[in-house]
Image: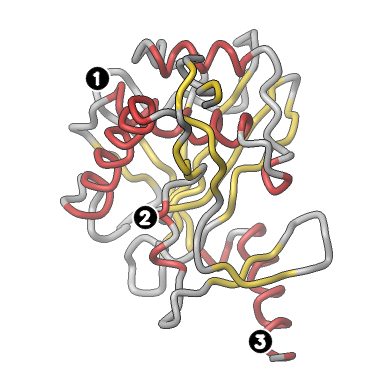
């Protein structure tokens, strides 16, 4: 028995994934293996499964599972996103604002409380408790509280570039902590701060269920180009 990180009740803790396993699937090769690079260390390795730790009780795992099932359904199975990226802006409607936003916030929060070195860049400070309460109370807040935006990456066939992934990481921009992660063909960004002045992350996810994404050819993105160079060097040595 231990204390669940979300509800704080004593319970037998489950094997809890930090980033849902389904977002890794497009990245795995035929052997169910993915090349993983560590941004701040000159090393790489292979992974056949995502990252996990014993963190949550059954009831809280079910809470996260509902958010994950929702995102997997509307982003991959019966997508609300368009099939093709035809221009520089993508507009999506019909989202469940609460579930969509809490899904993203929950990944950041789980990374923060995971205790895993690979997520050391995610350090929410006093916001960790605030996000815990929002997740527990099903309250994502207004669009400009922990705002979320995204940059869609366009593949050579015009579709979303689903087969790239970057784990959550952050930097400080204008006094705001901005966390980014790449999955589902989108660089997702969330600002975590106690003030809203000059926030570098526009609240493109709105509480009416609409979201505006900017779009870019995946080869034009500097972070992805750096990743591509690492991949080329890796496979050249293999």
Numbered disc 2: secondary structure: helix
- Picture coordinates of residue 170 (x, y %)? 69, 37
Residue placed under numbered mark 3 in the picture = 235
Q: Are marks 3 and 1 in contact (CB under 8 Å)?
A: no
Q: Residue at 59% of width from left, 36% of height from top? A: 111
Q: Is residue 12 placed above or below 125 in the rendered structure?
A: below
Question: Where in the figure is residue 22, as x and y percent of width and height?
Answer: 36, 55
In-image side of 128 versus 83 (left or right): right
What residue is shown with label 2? Answer: 22
Is 181 positioned to the left or the right of 116 in the image? left
How far apart marks 2 and 1 lie (CA) works out to 27 Å
* Separation (CA) of disc 3 from disc 1: 45 Å
Label 3 near label 2: C-beta < 8 Å? no
Is 173 placed left or right of 67 in the picture?
right
Q: Is residue 68 left or right of residue 153?
A: left
Along the line of sight, which residue is nearer the eye, 95 or 115?
115
According to the picture, the residue beneath numbered tag 1 turns out to be 208
Residue 125 image position (x, y, % from top left): 71, 18
Which element carries disc 1, helix, strand or loop?
Answer: loop
| CA distance for labels 2 and 3 | 25 Å
């Amino acid at each position: 028995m231990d204390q669940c990180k979300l509800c704080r009740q004593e319970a037998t803790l489950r094997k809890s994934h930090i980033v849902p396993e389904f977002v890794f699937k497009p990245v795995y090769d035929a052997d169910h293996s993915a090349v993983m690079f560590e941004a701040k260390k000159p090393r790489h390795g292979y992974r056949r499964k995502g990252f996990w730790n014993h963190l949550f009780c059954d009831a809280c795992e079910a809470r996260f599972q509902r958010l994950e099932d929702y995102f997997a359904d509307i982003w991959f199975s019966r997508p609300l996103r368009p099939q093709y990226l035809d221009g520089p802006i993508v507009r999506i409607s019909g989202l469940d604002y609460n579930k969509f936003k809490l899904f993203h916030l929950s990944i950041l929060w789980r990374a923060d409380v995971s205790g895993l070195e690979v997520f050391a860049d995610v350090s929410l400070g006093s916001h960790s408790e605030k996000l815990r309460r929002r997740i527990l109370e099903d309250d994502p807040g207004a669009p400009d509280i922990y705002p979320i935006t995204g940059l869609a990456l366009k593949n050579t066939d015009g579709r979303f570039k689903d087969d790239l992934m970057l784990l959550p990481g952050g930097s400080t921009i204008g006094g705001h902590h901005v966390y980014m992660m790449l999955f589902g063909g989108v660089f997702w960004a969330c600002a975590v701060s106690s003030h809203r002045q000059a926030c570098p992350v526009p609240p493109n996810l709105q509480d009416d269920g609409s979201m505006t994404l900017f779009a870019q050819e995946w080869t034009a993105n500097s972070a992805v180009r750096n990743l591509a160079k690492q991949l080329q060097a890796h496979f050249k040595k293999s």
